[in-house]
Image: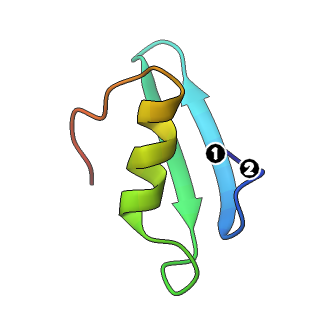
Amino acid sequence: MRRIKGVSNAEVLFNSSKLKVSYNESTLSDGKIKETVNGLGYKVLGEK
């Protein structure tokens, strides 16, 4: 995830099976993050 332009931090929380992503909203959309996660074979179940 960190390789995507606009992502400043990506952290996998193994104990809760979640991915935490910090990104620049003016450079990157949440849709692109969802697309990338889905492309890696995972589902996006929700967002905060």
Q: Residue furthest right?
A: 3
Q: Quadrant of residue 30?
A: bottom left
Q: Residue furthest top?
A: 15
Q: Where does residue 25 sit, x and y in percent of width and height?
A: 48, 79
User: Please, is residue 7 above or below residue 15 in the view?
Assistant: below
Residue 4 placement, left or right of 45: right
User: Please, is residue 41 above or below residue 23 in the view?
Assistant: above
Badge 1 element: strand
The mark lying in front, picked from 1 and 2, is 2
Badge 2 element: loop
Q: Crowding at label 2, few (<14), some or many (≥20) Cα neighbours within 10 Å? A: few
Residue occupying image coordinates x 39% and y 17%: 16
Q: Where does residue 26 sit, x and y in percent of width and height?
A: 52, 87
Q: Crowding at label 1, few (<14), some or many (≥20) Cα neighbours within 10 Å? A: some
Q: Quadrant of residue 11?
A: top right
Residue occupying image coordinates x 70% and y 57%: 4
User: Please, is residue 32 above or below residue 1 in the view?
Assistant: below
Distance from label 1 to label 2 (Cα)? Answer: 6 Å
Q: Residue furthest left?
A: 46
Residue with the mark numbered 2: 2
Residue occupying image coordinates x 58% and y 81%: 27
Amino acid under label 2?
Arg
Q: Are marks 1 and 2 in contact (CB under 8 Å)?
A: yes
- The answer to whether residue 22 is seen in the rendering is yes
Amino acid under label 1?
Ala
Please say which color scheme the image uses. rainbow
Residue 23 placement, left or right of 18: right
Residue 10, numbered label:
1
Q: Quadrant of residue 43?
A: top left
Q: Earlier in the sequence, mark 1 or mark 2?
A: 2
Residue occupying image coordinates x 36% and y 60%: 31
User: Please, is residue 3 above or below residue 18 in the view?
Assistant: below
